[in-house]
Image (cartoon, rainbow, N blue to C red):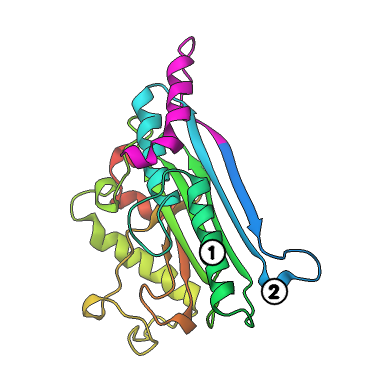
Amino acid sequence: MRRIGALIVGASLLAACSGKTRPPEPLFETRVTERRAGPCGADGQVDCAGARIEYPACVAAPVDEICERINRTVAEWVLRPLDGGAPFDAPDAVIERFLEDHGAERQRAPDGRHTWSMERTVRVSFQGPQAISLSALESGFTGGPHPFSSLTYLTFRPATGERLTLSEILVENGRHGLDAAGEIYFRQARELAAGAVLADEGFRFPGGRFTLPENFAFNRVGLQFHFNVDDIAPYPLGETGLTIPQGEALPWLRPEFQ
């Protein structure tokens, strides 16, 4: 955990030192780090690299541990390397490695075009008594046939800061009912007929049966889910997002999440 301490320690200390009055719910402040490298002027955009990281830091909460847990989870996502491996110490280190890799690629192929970009943006998308949801979007381009992009939802218990899984918010045996509701909205999002066979349309599900992803968040309308590129279909079919309205999700949710 020492590696992610640089991101969370400031927020944790601020929460601990603001003990005069505790807020009724977690409070967040936006932090931004960004840099560019290479010839980035008007005449040299083809060799420019830019990186930007934005995230919300939990700075105060009814209990310090709430901020510590939320900030730790955000740090794990923000500080991970693009190519896997151990997390970096701070957002600056993530960006520095990205720009170093860009510089190395320019030296390796000096006659090529090296317009690189990388953005990681985490924002509070929902905050209510039942949950706090953050949307974590990563996008960029490092050469190759197409850019990269993925959306991850991070959902927490407001009272503890613990990250929630889909099974934890559902009643016993509620997954089947929620999947059935989700399939209706998935087909609407993909403009598929009710009788269309998902496998024939290019979508891969275990046993050919539609299943919602673990990638979920609360919003003002209900529950939203997101399939990233390559999760259930080849790249050309792209990503799919859907929302199950609150009224249709309620029968399958535990009372504390309604």
The location of residue 146, given as percent across then percent down, is 54, 79
Query: Which residue occupies the foreground of this view, 83 or 30?
Result: 83
Q: Is residue 204 above or below residue 91?
A: below
In the depicted view, which residue is nearer to us: 207 or 56?
Answer: 56
Q: Is residue 246 visible?
A: no
Residue type for callout 2: Val
Q: CA distance from mark 2 to mark 1?
A: 18 Å
In the rendered image, residue 59, in percent from the top left (x then y), is placed at 49, 28
Residue drawn where x is 51% and y is 70% of the image? 148
In the rendered structure, which segment of residues is drawn in magenta? 1-29
Q: Is residue 124 placed above or below 116 in the rendered structure?
A: above
- Tell me which corner region of the image, top left, top right, bottom left or bottom right, holds residue 157: top left
Q: Amino acid at mark 1?
A: Ser
Would residue 13 be found to the left or right of residue 252 on screen? right
Is 11 contained in the magenta span? yes
Q: Report helix, strand or loop for mark 1.
A: strand
What SS does tag 2 mark?
Answer: helix
Q: Which residue is mark 1?
A: 139
Question: Is residue 202 visible to the viewer in this orientation of the structure?
Answer: yes
Q: Residue lying farthest right?
A: 42
User: Can you name the residue that lies furthest to the top here?
Assistant: 20
The quarter of the image holding the N terminus is: top left
Residue 122: x percent and y percent?
51, 49
In the image shown, does 227 or 75 lie closer to the viewer?
75
| Circle 1 crowding by C-alpha within 10 Å: few under 14, some 14–19, many from 20 | some
Q: Depth-wise, is mark 2 or mark 1 nearer the camera?
A: 2
| Label disc, if present, on residue 46 of the rendered structure | 2
Tell me the residue at 45%/12% (across/down).
Answer: 19
Drawn side of residue 158 relative to residue 91, left or right: left
Quadrant location of the C terminus in the rendered image:
top left
